[in-house]
Amino acid sequence: MKKFRERNPVLVGMVGGLLVAAVGLTTFYYKDLPVIGGGTTYTAEFGEAAGLKPNDEVRVAGVKVGEVTGGSLDRDHVKVTFRAKNVWLGDETVAAIKIKTLLGQKNLVLDPLGTKELNSDTPIPRQRTITPYDVTDAFGDLAKTAAAINTDQLAEGFRALSQTFTASTPDQVRRTLDGLTALSRTISSRDEELKQLLTNTSKFTGTIAQRTDSIEALIRDGGVLLDEIRARRDAIAALLDGTKNLASQLSALVKENQAQLGPALAQLDRVTDVLQRNQANLDRGLRLAGPFYRLIGNGVSNGPWLDTYLCGLVPAAGGGCVPPKPGGGR
């Protein structure tokens, strides 16, 4: 067997590159592998996608068994592909797009019915798929319907109907028609406000639906915080009890030493009064102490003696008080 250094480096490099590429492809596309991947891929036909997106969960009896991989338009319906792992699906399986949260996030729910195993090459037909009606779409359709109604004509119609039945109808029916006329007139007078309200409501629900992930993360983080506070509840309770006991002990200590603390505080008050009255003298003393201690330092800093002179002991030639030589006399 040849040693590694004796082998062809080009061939070794090619084999190494192929191994690295294989490992990289396996890392990125391991879900597509039949054994260790994300499961078996199935297809379901829906009348509409209803907001279902790739990576949305696939659940059976409330347990996540896979995820949606994609969706494509096929003539008048939508084909949704999804993976399912570690679950048995029958040939009468029903697929339904359900609303996962109130914010509009969807998931694919499977009801595994039938006696035979579902063929992955046979799509689940539209007869066994269910599409929900979204709250966001409901507000949008309500806004469109309200915008299409001619409230002026509606009010005029109710008014004409009331006038037509005025002479030959009972009082209860006439009052009912009068009330409907007043109601339609009120709606007509608030037509623009109602349209604006419905439009803003539709925009609001759409924005909330787009921010589903952020709101879910906020709620999830809030739950984590509450769980941590709950876990630290005993520690917080012990801290509060300790603080309460410390306050009680300090109160008892002050009461026990009240006789000694009272005179001491009174003396301290008098000392502070004396210091305040003599503050000017203290300031002057501290101001003069600086030059004095500087001269003392100069006098004893040359050695174990005092370096100074007596002014006026020897008359100076020019008069004044100067030492006879540098450094002065000892």
Image (cartoon, helix red, strand yellow):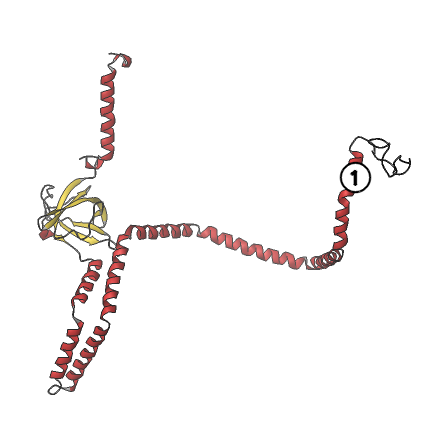
Judged left or right of residue 6, residue 290 is right
Where is mark 1, residue-wise? Answer: 295
Q: Residue at x 18, y 66 (%)?
A: 147
In this view, the residue in front, 305 or 129, is 305
| Helix, strand or loop at mark 1 | helix
* Residue 216 spot, x, y in % from top left: 31, 52
Three-letter code for the amino acid on which mark 1 is drawn: Leu
Q: Residue at x 13, y 83 (%)?
A: 163
The residue most toward the bottom is 167
The quadrant holding residue 19 is top left
Which quadrant: the C terminus? top right
Residue 150 lies, with reference to residue 304, above or below; the image says below
Which quadrant: the N terminus? top left
Judged left or right of residue 112, residue 260 is right
In this view, the residue in front, 170 or 297, is 297
* Residue 122 spot, x, y in % from top left: 9, 43
